[in-house]
Image (spheres, grey):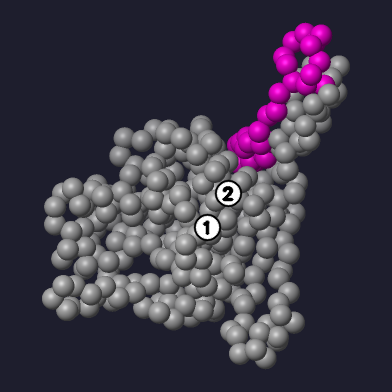
Amino acid sequence: MRLLDCIAQSRAPFLVEQMNGVVWRLRSACDFAAQLTTCPLRYVLSDELTRTCAALAYSEGHQLADCIDLLRIPAERLWVEWSDTVRRDEFLRTAPGGIADAARPDVLRAGVLIRAARSGRSGMMTTFWTVRDQPMDPFVAALETHFDFDGSLSDPGGLTALFGASTGSTAAGLTDGRDAIQKFIRYRLERTWLDYYQQHVLSDENRTRVLRDSLATVAGDLPLLLALSLLFATRGGLPATPSSLAALNAKRRRLGKPPLLEHVEISAPVFAEAAARTDSANSSWRRGPRLHHVRGHLVRREDVVYWRAPHWRGHVRLGRVRSRNVALKLM
């Protein structure tokens, strides 16, 4: 079952009972069931598109940071879901020295619920996920992710400021393009989790552990969403297939089961990698550059961004590759 349906059908609150019998009710997926059910736009990404977005989000250089003035969230209320196994594999391949991702090795699917300003330039998002051992029980992050691409967010404190009901950031001292986007992001502990941690997390060591684990659940998501927003700006847009669940939901209702949520499946076949040329790759008589694969990447020329499609590059006698550039326009 998709993550969005797990959340929409979630009914169990998250309760923590102390040794003295006091019960804490912390924010959980069931608190978002109604919001997700009424969300007007719900996207589910194909594995191919997830891999492409992750490659852009976590690549070295300044591909996203250099396009910050072009970034827009495409709707005021939006759900986006993907396979986190695919995202994490790309993260580990492109950014092994980045933010620790150890807290999410068993995550099956992940998604975010976004509330954005009308301009699409600012807003807040909440992260959800399911794990392999409990694929039907969704989790919700304790941290909220706030963003503003016009740089209007208040000056952040360090991450330890999160325990004082303030916002925190990881941007201090970061210069790498992959991390530069963090300058436009702030994190905040949700109120129920803040109250709980203020009462129970006292030592500096425990606070560091809580912050590290909480940050690992959310830090990689917004860059992936920003890469998606750039790809949405391509002329003609991304291939979208609305779900058709009427017949299935009619059967589910007859069986007394809740209906599944309609959504839009987004893919990106135009960005598929070039087919391998093994016969040419084995040639040894060539002079000049050996045949090699060039990954897809963004190139900016003033206010226009081009997607340079993946292709093979090598000696002309091994076959000419016609690269394809897709122009991205301002939304």
**Residue that appears at 21% across and 52% down:** 207
Using residue 207 as the reference point, say whether residue 169 is left or right of it. Answer: right
Q: Name the residue at 61% across, 90% down.
A: 256
Q: Amino acid at mark 1?
A: Leu
Which quarter of the figure has residue 82?
bottom right
Give the CA separation, mark 1 to mark 2. Answer: 9 Å
**In x, y percent, where is residue 124?**
42, 62
On the rendered image, what quadrant is the N terminus found in? Answer: bottom right
Q: Which residue is denoted by mark 1 in the rendering?
A: 108
Left or right of 4? Residue 262 is right
Q: Residue 220 versus residue 180: which sits nearer the camera?
A: 220
Helix, strand or loop status at disc 2: helix
Q: Position of residue 303 (x, y in %)?
A: 61, 41
Q: In what element is the residue under mark 1?
A: strand
Q: Which residue is mark 2?
A: 86
Callout count: 2
Residue 135 higher or lower than 275, as above or below? below
- Spot the residue most to the front: 133
Relative image position of residue 214 (x, y in whole percent)? 33, 55
The residue nearer to you, when weighing 133 against 211, is: 133
> What span is colored magenta in the figure?
280-308
